[in-house]
Amino acid sequence: MSDSVFAAVAQAPEDSILGVTVAYNKDQSPNKLNLGVGAYRTEEGKPLVLNVVRKAEQLLVNDTSRVKEYLPITGLADFNKLSAKLILGGTSPAIQESRVATVQCLSGTGSLRVGAEFLAQHYPVKTILIPVPTWGNHPKVFNAAGLSVQTYRYYDPSTRGLDFSGLLEDLGNAPSRAIVLFHACAHNPTGVDPTSDQWEQIRQLVRSKRLLPFFDSAYQGFASGSLDADAGSVRAFVADGGECLAAQSYAKNMGMYGERVGALSIVCRSAEIAKRVESQLKLVIRPMYSNPPIHGASIVATILKDGELYNEWTVELKAMADRIISMRQQLFDALKAKGTAGDWSHIIKQIGMFTFTGLNADQVAFMTKEYHIYMTFDGRISMAGLSSKTVPHLVEAIHAAVTTIGA
Ligand code: IK2
């Protein structure tokens, strides 16, 4: 052992989100409940493969003319066009004017990383502002690409809502032309989104300070059940003719988690600039992973280009969003019925996959130890991991945590 050339390698800590699943998997209790990772589960607690995905996959398998050649560096052309249309809207002038450079990437994370690498190489300002709190991987992705990460205020724990004045003040004080990361909808982990009026004020400030918006769209369709409504923030920024980036993930809205399907779109001022941007994106991608995988993107493209499959997808997507919304109501009602101390109305006000409960790290540790309920230490629970059957167990645990540990 001691003569290993790797003897000095230190044990790294588990990832704060994926590590929750590691701990959950080790727990032998029959009552264990994983509300950590944001992955959709059915009422029976099972992972879900959408019917429409199974259908598209079958169509692909039956088509014996299909081959497994390398894709171009930028990925599947159809997939890219359809992805840009999905996020920017079918009638987007930016698409009609060929001002959008879109590349297929490895899900949302890969899209963020390719965008960050591109900005680090080609954008003059190397500072990116991210909200507090945000998805735990954001600072790691941007730091790894060589950007300098700063923060802006986002969540106000006292109201369990948006700290809008703090957000405006911090963006107002941001270095001119800095990059700003926005969650397009269903903010992770807080479930708190700006209203459309607030987005409009944010847009005006961003444009007046010449900040560069970078949208992370990991939950399109998951927040409201409508693909168009959930893309509203991005579309408002594109409608003003200005530039922005958007990273899309099909992990949640199509249940394609492990297939790693996503896209990065960079909206530019002109077709000529978009062409040059795309040429540079290829130079970013080629030494990273050469070109993206074909299977998942082919499934997504098959669904997006066929009217019938597309409609079927929207129905299944809405059913997932609706189940999550109904879980919010059930959890809220059950806590009220139990008389658990505190105002739990944020559970039904927040939106998307997660509820930022307001439970502290000690309370979370208590719930894991005593009730085998797994969640991130910041008190975030994945509503998609909950079912009508498990709500009572969660309510017992929250009630006991609040009563025993206090605030
Ligand atoms: N951006 C945000 C805001 C995300 O939430 C995610 C997915 N996170 O899911 C794990 C969790 O928080 O429990 C992503 C990007 C990237 O997801 P992917 O790379 O799987 O598309």
Image (cartoon, helix red, strand yellow):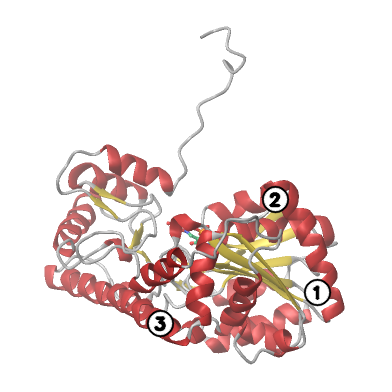
- Residue at the image position 59 percent from the left and 75 percent from the top: 83
Q: Is residue 282 left or right of residue 192?
A: right
Q: Which residue is mark 1?
A: 274
Q: Nearer the viewer, residue 132 or 31?
A: 31
- Residue 131, numbered label: none
> Residue at 42% of width from left, 47% of height from top?
18
Badge nearest the viewer, 1 or 2: 2
Which residue is pictured at 52% across the width and 53% down the height?
Answer: 136
Eyeballing the image, is 197 above or below 53? below
Residue 324 x %, y % = 31, 72
Label 1 to label 2: alpha-carbon separation: 21 Å
Which circle's residue, 2 or 3, is located before the other in the chain?
Answer: 2
SS for callout 3: helix
Tell me if I can see residue 134 in this picture. no
Q: Secondary structure at mark 2?
A: loop
Q: Which mark is residue 290?
A: 2
From what the image shows, is residue 323 above or below residue 147? below
Earlier residue among tags 1 and 2: 1
Please name the residue that numbered disc 3 is placed on: 314
**Quadrant location, the C terminus:** bottom left
159 with respect to 404 (left or right): right
Q: Is residue 120 above or below residue 23?
A: below
